[in-house]
């Protein structure tokens, strides 16, 4: 009997210790790796089908779904506006400034190519049109004396600007005078006081003999002779 008892204790004791070790191992796994068992057992209040959906979502790679924060449209509009502004043509020092002076009484026209005034450099189309509208509404006194009645911008580009200037010319006489003012040639009517045309023709670039005549107010017999002079010496 003692032998049988010893054999039983020898078998039972290891089995008990094995069971205790297995239980301790399971409990330690629960403690250190709780996430594994959260997937195995549904949380309270969620059935097996719902739990499977949760597991499937958690197990998937992040979905590449665009999120609209309400600012994408504004950014695109701003980018478009910047591109339009960058591509818009602006005037530069090399832009040809062409004036077509038209007499609305007899429909005659004279074209003058001038250097672009510095105040217009860097302007885009809208800015230039605005300035022209202001000029038309409030023309200089000298333009009023010439009979200025309005203008029209015929074309606008970086290469050239064409403006039609309409006049109802005052013709108190048939002759004119050329005079020097601020190193520029100005055209006066026969009374030598009323300014007829302010040109950009520089006096110091004219032949010396012609300079002397203009300094003393050079008489021009008629309009045809005046236009010939302007066409020959306008830049």
Image (cartoon, rainbow, N blue to C red):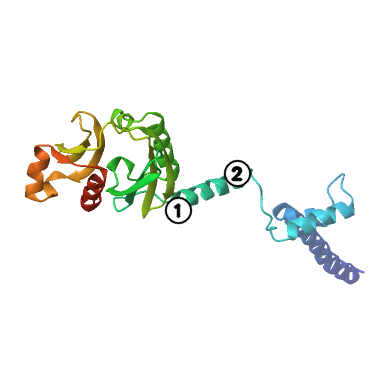
Label 2 element class = loop
Left or right, residue 115 beside residue 184: right
In x, y percent, where is residue 61? Answer: 70, 61
Percent position (x, y) of residue 232?
22, 53
Relative depth, front residue between 144 and 14: 144
Viewer-side residue, 156 vs 49: 156
Q: Residue at x 9, y 37 (%)?
A: 216
205 lies above or below 56:
above
Depth check: give the residue in front, 91 or 180.
180
Q: Nearer the viewer, mark 1 or mark 2?
A: 1
In the rendered image, residue 140, in percent from the top left (x then y), is placed at 31, 30
Q: Is residue 28 left or right of residue 87?
A: right
Tell me which numbered mark, 1 or 2, is placed earlier along the sequence: 2
**Left or right position of 47 against 232:** right
Residue of label 2: 71
Quadrant where the N terminus is found in the figure = bottom right
Residue 200 makes an appearance in the image: yes
Residue placed under numbered mark 1 in the picture = 87
> In the figure, residue 39 lies in which quadrant?
bottom right
Disc 1/disc 2 C-alpha distance (Å): 25 Å
| Residue at left offset 46%, top offset 48% | 85
Q: Which label number is shown at residue 34?
A: none
């Amino acid at each position: 009997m003692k032998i049988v008892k010893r054999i039983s204790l020898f078998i039972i004791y290891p089995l008990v210790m094995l069971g205790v070790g297995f239980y301790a191992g399971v409990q330690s796994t629960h403690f250190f790796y709780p996430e594994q068992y959260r997937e195995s057992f549904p949380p309270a209040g969620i059935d097996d089908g719902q739990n499977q959906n949760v597991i499937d979502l958690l197990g998937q790679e992040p979905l590449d779904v665009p999120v609209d924060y309400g600012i994408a449209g504004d950014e695109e509009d701003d980018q478009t506006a910047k591109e339009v502004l960058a591509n818009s043509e602006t005037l530069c020092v090399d832009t040809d400034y062409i004036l077509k002076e038209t007499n609305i009484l007899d429909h005659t026209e004279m074209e003058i190519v001038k250097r672009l005034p510095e105040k217009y450099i860097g302007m885009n189309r809208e800015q230039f049109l605005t300035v022209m509208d202001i000029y038309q509404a409030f023309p200089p006194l000298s333009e009023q004396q010439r009979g200025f009645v309005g203008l029209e911008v015929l074309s606008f580009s970086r290469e050239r600007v064409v403006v039609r200037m309409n006049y109802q010319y005052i013709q108190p006489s048939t002759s004119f005078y050329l005079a020097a003012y601020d190193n520029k040639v100005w055209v006066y009517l026969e009374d030598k006081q009323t300014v007829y045309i302010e040109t950009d023709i520089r006096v110091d670039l004219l032949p010396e003999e012609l300079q002397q005549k203009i300094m003393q107010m050079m008489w021009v017999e008629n309009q045809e002779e005046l236009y010939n002079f302007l066409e020959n010496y306008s830049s």
